[in-house]
Image (cartoon, rainbow, N blue to C red):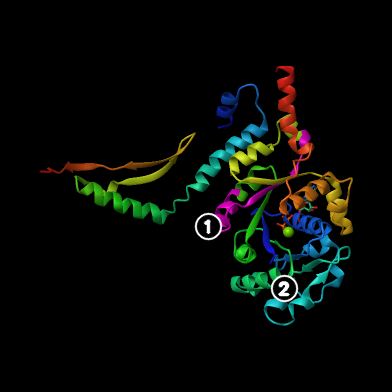
Amino acid sequence: MGEVIVVTSGKGGVGKTTTVANIGTGLAAEGYKVVLVDTDIGLRNLDVVMGLENRIVYDIVDVVSGNCRLKQALIKDKRFEELYLLPAAQTKDKTAISMEQMKELCANLKNDFDYVIIDCPAGIEMGFKNAIAGAEKAIVVTTPEVSAVRDADRIIGLLEANDLEEPKLIINRIRPDMVKRGDMMDIDDMIEILAIDLLGVVPEDELIVISTNKGEPAVLEKTSKAGQAYKNISLRITGENVPLMHLESHAGIMKKLRKLLGV
Amino acid sequence: MLEFLQRVLGKSFSSKKIAKERLRLVLLHDRTCLTPEILDSLKGDLIQVISRYMVIDEKNLDVSLNTEDESVALVANIPILKVKQIS
Ligand SMILES: Nc1ncnc2c1ncn2[C@@H]1O[C@H](COP(=O)(O)OP(=O)(O)OP(=O)(O)O)[C@@H](O)[C@H]1O
Ligand SMILES: [Mg+2]
């Protein structure tokens, strides 16, 4: 019996889809059976980030409305045998699926996969409610900006109100140089404000854009810091205790340095 | 507000500190999600309780949320017309 994890944020464009593609691929690389579910109906994106856009025949709405069998709609990844994508519908709207249908879908997928990872649309409306309906665990993605953190706080409240207790935080697009200058909130600041557990920190990284251009998740790229951060996050999801990367604990190092120098 | 922050934070002034302080305040407000309906119902209850002890001017009664620099406060302004004699 697998685990259903939803990746949310509230604010749009902070890196949900990137996160789903990378941790999904990261988990598959570790040998797990994984299915990624794109619930961003009307704004399908996970397919292109995964490089699978040319293989789509059926979509999630076809599945829940009985136009096809679940197996027919699942698209097999190019790189991993046991990694699949269930794409969102592009031409329908968010009312094409109900919460009940989502619950049933997740329950079915859970039987066949170790991890069911759901890419949630931005916002707190129907699309969000559908995306979390069948989930057992939640990840909240934010960037170190006031508006993104504020929306993350709102989402955390809504998740808890819907019995998704103890969501975990991913801080994306952190820039160590700006943190060092004091012009970007650091990890501790955001943990303190949001009062939830940290799952990982992903730095701003050009290779994310490059890998999205190519349709190959950065987690497979050994030279990418963001990719390595996503690899660590994948391992933490499996229960491994992986410490934060060097760059991720910048603030801590600075503190130690200051202590050492006595300033 | 910015001036106040600059004063409080002194020399170690950075945009990160402003961000953090602004977030703290905005979340304080967001998290106390008292809707106008809840506030109205609270008002009704207050009137009921207080009326046991005094006659109040219900029309000019005001219950609202005030944001101070550091916190959110429930402020009630209740004009008293007469204190009841309780035996
Ligand atoms: N760590 C990073 N470094 C650099 N660019 C990034 C990083 N994370 C995400 N991006 C870029 O930010 C953009 C938005 O990312 P993404 O599509 O994953 O966000 P989203 O939360 O899914 O957006 P939406 O709310 O629209 O679904 C993309 O162009 C992506 O390449
Ligand atoms: Mg997305």
Q: Is A199 in the magenta?
A: no
Query: Which labelled disc corresponds to residue A151?
Result: none
Residue placed under numbered mark 1 in the picture? A161
Cβ at disc 2 under 8 Å from ligand 2: no
Residue type at numbered disc 2: Ile
B56 sits left or right of A176 in the view? left
Front residue (pair A236, B75): A236
Specify whether residue B57 is in view: no
Residue A11, percent from left and from top: 66, 53
Establish if A112 lies above or below B80.
below
- Residue A72 is drawn in which quadrant? bottom right
Crowd rating for badge 2 (residues with CA inside 10 Å; few <14, some 14–19, many 20+): many
Cβ at disc 1 under 8 Å from ligand 1: no
Establish if A62 lies above or below A176.
below
Residue type at numbered disc 1: Ala
Residue A80, percent from left and from top: 86, 63
Q: Secondary structure at mark 1?
A: helix
Q: Is A168 in the magenta?
A: yes
Considering every residue shown, the one lying at the far left of the view is B87
Considering every residue shown, the one lying at the far top of the view is A262
Q: Secondary structure at mark 2?
A: helix
Considering every residue shown, the one lying at the far bottom of the view is A67
The Cα–Cα distance between marks 1 and 2, rounded to whole angstroms, is 26 Å
Residue at 63% over, 37% down: B19
Residue at 65% over, 37% down: A188
The chain holding disc 1 is A
Specify whether residue A236 is in view: yes
Residue span colored magenta: A153-177
Residue A65, percent from left and from top: 67, 80
Residue placed under numbered mark 2 in the picture? A60
B86 sits left or right of B77 in the view? left
